[in-house]
Image: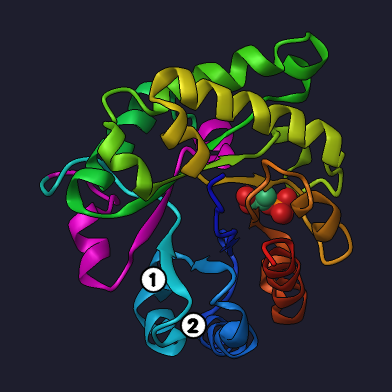
Amino acid sequence: MTVRKPFVGGNWKMNTTAATAAQLAVDVACGCDDLLGRADVAVFPPFPYLDTVGKHLGNGVRLGAQDLYHEAEGAFTGEVSAGMLIDVGVGVVLVGHSERRHVIGEGDELINCKARAALGAGLDIILCIGETIEQREAGQTQQVNVGQLMAGLEAVAADQMPRVTIAYEPVWAIGTGRTATPDDAQAVHAVIRSTLADRYDGAVAESTRIQYGGSVKANNAQSLFAEPDIDGGLIGGASLKADDFVTIVTAAAQASS
Ligand code: PEP
């Protein structure tokens, strides 16, 4: 059986200032220092603070970006390329986050372009997928997640999969305080893993990390991470408080022990 090292990401979204981002980076780096042998950790600050956060993180906690554009350079006002992210020390990027899909309006085709551009440039990716409450209530949870997974991974080769993490983030649980039960989350994670086995093979399915995201807090992380197919989490609100975030990383590290 493959042992997957848990992976916890802190998505700071459009929050922090230069000063609070730097302080949060220092506090997260310090708090996670002893845990990095048992859990991988990344933070995803806003673009303008990537450089300074990277300098304050040191070498342990990874620097992530919340998005990228799939073209390498040119007349794409407001966009940021994979090469630019790599230039400032980014190693991993979110692709298809719920707010990119449902607030900004990104579709599966664009998300796949971004995934392939990031991987092609050498970045790791976290591909985010998840159903809305309407889709869940209509019984479409499995279909929606499998669809987004397959579309997001179109033309992504098996040998690139070690650099891919999947984040299952039900839209109705993000920023709402309403968390999926461990059983409900586990059920979707198992479907994602078996879809990876069909799309690639058993080895890829067993080794790919699948995070849960959606109102993960210091007081519910342990029960979620205890599920066999939940390999850490993507954390929004609770990642803005270093103590809470470190407690969540601790829960992930303990789940792996
Ligand atoms: C997220 O931003 O991916 C997220 C899961 O947010 P929150 O933890 O606030 O629900």
Task: Please give the name of the residue rendered at 82% of the width and 60% of the height, measured from the top-left corner.
Answer: 222
Task: Please give the name of the residue rendered at 45% of the width and 81% of the height, measured from the top-left corner.
Answer: 60
Which quarter of the image is occupied by the N terminus? top right
Q: Secondary structure at mark 2?
A: helix
Q: Is residue 114 visible?
A: no
* Disc on res. 214: none
Q: Position of residue 219 (x, y in %)?
A: 89, 63
Q: CA distance from mark 1 to mark 2?
A: 8 Å
* Disc on res. 48: 1
Q: Amino acid at mark 1?
A: Pro
Q: Is residue 199 left or right of residue 81?
A: right
- Where does the magenta region start and end? 75-104
Which quarter of the image is occupied by the C terminus? bottom right
Asked if the beta carbon under badge 1 is closer than 8 A to the nearest atom of ligand 1, the reply is no
Q: Which residue carries the number 2 mark?
A: 18
Q: Nearer the viewer, residue 153 or 15?
A: 153
The residue lying furthest to the front in this view is: 1
Q: Amino acid at mark 2?
A: Ala
Q: Is residue 153 left or right of residue 128?
A: left
